[in-house]
Image: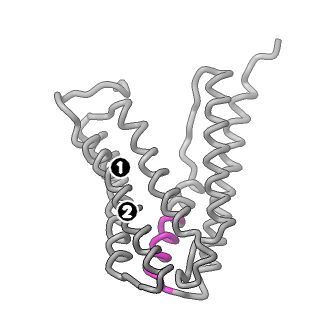
Amino acid sequence: MSADTVTKPGLPLALKITLVRIMGIPVFVGLLVYYLSGLHEGHNLMQLRLAALGVFIVIAATDALDGYLARARNEVTRLGTVLDPLADKALILSALIILTRPTLPQLAPHIPIWFTTLVISRDVVLIIGYFLVHHFIGHVEVRPRWSGKIATALTLLAICWVLMQKLDVWFDRFIIVAGICTAISMIQYLVDGARQLAKIPHH
């Protein structure tokens, strides 16, 4: 089946879910910003934090749903294959950036700066690598890696942990494991890209 083939007229259900997920991200960001602003002023508006947590869980949980529906209903579209990972990255990066608040002691635990920097660096490196491989070869073979899936799952759990504001000595160890998986996934994708570039004929 071609990636831009849609067997049913109108907007596919899977794409509708993806669009709803994207529209939910500003809602999540707004709730979180207002909550942190309240903390900064000495007000712990727990209802805003719980609402942000609920929106985050719904958006993250429906990630697999739109992909499953697209395949099950034969509604895979080129736009959907672009927007789906974009929604995931936008959700995770916005949460990490906002929750990296070492200067706000009321937010405990919080995402450490090194972890957010690592995740952003990996994504930037992968984007640059993608365009390099596509420029020299004309196409890119992207193979999902176990480390990438585990790193994403652990990152989502870390964000939920912070949003629940459950201070635990295990959080620091947990975030280190998530960071190691993130670094491994970056290395594996870089090796994949290097192998594809190595196939370029030398003149």
Gap between marks 1 and 2 measured at Cα:
10 Å
Query: In the depicted view, which residue is nearer to us: 115 or 202?
Result: 115
Point 49% across, 63% down: residue: 95
162 part of magenta stretch: yes
Q: Residue 69, located in which quarter of the rendered image? A: top left
Query: In the depicted view, which residue is nearer to us: 48 or 180?
Result: 48
* Residue 99 picture location, percent across and down: 53, 69
Q: Secondary structure at mark 1?
A: helix
In the rendered image, the residue lying farthest to the top is: 203
Q: Residue 16, located in which quarter of the rendered image? A: top left
Quarter occupied by the C terminus = top right
* Residue 201 picture location, percent across and down: 76, 16
Quickly name the residue at label 1: 22
In the rendered image, the residue lying farthest to the front is: 41
Q: Residue 139, located in which quarter of the rendered image? A: top right
* Residue 67 picture location, percent across and down: 34, 45
Query: In the depicted view, which residue is nearer to us: 68 or 85?
Result: 85
Point 50% across, 76% down: residue: 162
Range drawn in magenta: 155-166
Point 61% across, 67% down: residue: 178
Task: Please indicate whether residue 10 sits to the left or right of residue 120 in the image.
Answer: left
Residue 6 position (above or below residue 42): above
163 part of magenta stretch: yes
- Under mark 1, the amino acid is Ile
In the rendered image, the residue lying farthest to the right is: 203
Tag shown at residue 28: 2
Which secondary structure type mostly characterizes the magenta part of the structure? helix
* Residue 148 picture location, percent across and down: 57, 54
